[in-house]
Amino acid sequence: MDYKAIINQHKESYLEELFEVIRQKSISAENVGIEACAELVGEKMAAAGVRHVEIIKGDHHPVVYGEHIVSEDAMTLLIYGHYDVQPPDPLEEWDSEPFEPTIRDGRIYARGVGDNKGQFMAQLLAFKTYMTAHGNLPINIKFLIEGEEEIGSRNLEPFIRTHKDKLKADLVYTSDGPMLSNGHPYILLGVRGMLYVELNAEGSAFDNHSGNKGNIARNPVWELVHLLGTMKDSAGRTLIEGFYDEVKPPTDLEKELLMQLPFHLEEIRRDIGDDTLEMTKEEYYRKLCFEPTLNISGLVSGYGGEGAKTIIPSTAKLKLDMRLVMDQDPEKIYQSLEDHIEAHAPT
Amino acid sequence: MDYKAIINQHKESYLEELFEVIRQKSISAENVGIEACAELVGEKMAAAGVRHVEIIKGDHHPVVYGEHIVSEDAMTLLIYGHYDVQPPDPLEEWDSEPFEPTIRDGRIYARGVGDNKGQFMAQLLAFKTYMTAHGNLPINIKFLIEGEEEIGSRNLEPFIRTHKDKLKADLVYTSDGPMLSNGHPYILLGVRGMLYVELNAEGSAFDNHSGNKGNIARNPVWELVHLLGTMKDSAGRTLIEGFYDEVKPPTDLEKELLMQLPFHLEEIRRDIGDDTLEMTKEEYYRKLCFEPTLNISGLVSGYGGEGAKTIIPSTAKLKLDMRLVMDQDPEKIYQSLEDHIEAHAPT
């Protein structure tokens, strides 16, 4: 049977299989629904016809491993993906429920549909379709669907080392990344690394009344604001000593290659949601590819709801993510950050 | 019948009446349960025997007004209180449900029990007890229980002007404020005023991915941090031009009087929840009574939950409360703040 006919025939049930996986929460940061989602993905794999499916547990969120060996001599393709998703907050920004997939204007809206459930389910259903059409595959396929990508895949490297033989493959295929704006396929030669740090500033043991204790009780938010002020200047340059030590400017060849990449400011503006963005092509790719970031991804203290609450907050929570470029060592950068905080934070 | 006997006899039902009022949410900042709470307080007043009870609505949260006139010639006491409460967040800090009163070690724990439901209900139940004991009161009583105290009582002044005759009284009684640490009754000669401001910093139209858009998309939290850094120095002094213009230091007589107030550093530390607090008596009362505050009561941006989320937040919300001292004009201070932001905020 022709594969297009099979897809047409199963369109609804394929979509429903994806939706089931999407409906199953799997927020790695909060450890919500992780085990259940791994089980479900394993079931989908087995149902697709993958001969050997294993949920590998350990000192990490379960890895769903699938193996379909047709011949020792055939080429082996390893498909990598992840079933975990980012937390869906802030919930009020969603036009539809994050874990209830909704189709609008031909696109599916749901948490994780584009990162990465949609992709690995497409690959799995492609496998299933091929099996239905031809009875078997001409190559060996391995699936590695992990559950910690959204929290940095810290256990993936040791996992791969441990299961080196099992994961042996001729080609690794993954579709989890951005697209070029012209829609062309592209080769990814590397990505920035990440260092993620959480900092908790503490004042009193509990929130105080800002009228009765104002000027008296310490306010950890003010202290954090002053500390952050020493970390970055208003032009966006990081002031932590040693932060840029290993950073190299692009070579002439790299600059030349960058200038051959597509660049449409209007598209970037739309993509980022800021129509005031002003940037040259050179600046854009230099900042994106050759410069590390120091980003505040969360700063939460005191009352953020409607109206007024008159408190001196007792704590302030800061989340920093740093995207590191070639030659930067996350351990060294962490040490620089620690030294900086030591030198500038109030005691 | 002796009033003590009546109290003993009704202890349970009195407590239950208070608990009913506490269970009824009444968060003025979020306009949650306000109308229902006003109705309930009105019912309690009528049930206590107050002859005329009115829920006065208008361009404000309902005011519960009660009037019990025994004679034109008798002295009139006006009791002021408020039925609204602060938002109970953060909920995870509560040992028991905020709107489910719980007794532990002889104290009632619940949102609003000490501010101000406990107090006005005690007064109302005292009225009821007196009525039961003596059949009537020797004086006229008026109750004014409002629903906007926690959001600044902005409509109270015009309300009082409008209902001047109705509220006419020889004495106003209120119990809504802190206690001296030695437990003695004290005379309050004035309180600091308040200016509450909310500031929303906006970057892109939506949150961006910190890996794909890092260094490119604007981060409004960083911008807010830099703005806040210009508002206060690390020693706690406000840097907004004109902020201290009208502030006068205490006179010699005031200093002398302050020094006669009780001061127990250990008690203040316990009360504030910070056993590292170091402060002299002079400094404590000067800061508390003669200096204005610039307090961050909320700063919320991006992700504050468990684990990591890698975003460039699109917005940052700041709540500032300023406690103003004698001679400071809130309108002028607001203008100074606006000028400061104009001069220092990124465009």
Image (cartoon, coloured by chain):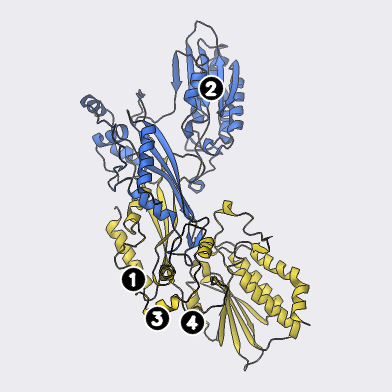
Chain colours: A blue, B yellow
Residue on which disc 2 sits: A124
Residue on which disc 3 sits: B253
Local crowd at mark 3 within 10 Å, few (<14), some, or many (≥20)? few
Q: Secondary structure at mark 3?
A: helix
Subunit of mark 1? B
Residue on which disc 4 sits: B161
Local crowd at mark 2 within 10 Å, few (<14), some, or many (≥20)? many
Q: Is residue B347 above or below residue B50?
A: above
Residue drawn where x is 53% and y is 7% of the image = A71
Q: Nearer the viewer, mark 2 or mark 1?
A: 1
Q: What is the three-letter code of the residue carrying label 1?
A: Lys
Residue drawn where x is 69% and y is 75% of the image = B125
| Earlier sequence position, callout 1 versus callout 4 | 4
Subunit of mark 4? B
Subunit of mark 2? A
Residue on which disc 1 sits: B332
Q: Nearer the viewer, mark 3 or mark 2?
A: 3
Look at the numbered discs 3 and 4 and tell me whether their residues touch, using CB distance below 8 Å. no
Disc number at residue A175? Answer: none
Look at the numbered discs 1 and 4 and tell me whether their residues touch, using CB distance below 8 Å. no
Subunit of mark 3? B
Local crowd at mark 1 within 10 Å, few (<14), some, or many (≥20)? few
Q: For the residues marked 1 and 4, what is the alpha-carbon distance in whole angstroms? A: 24 Å
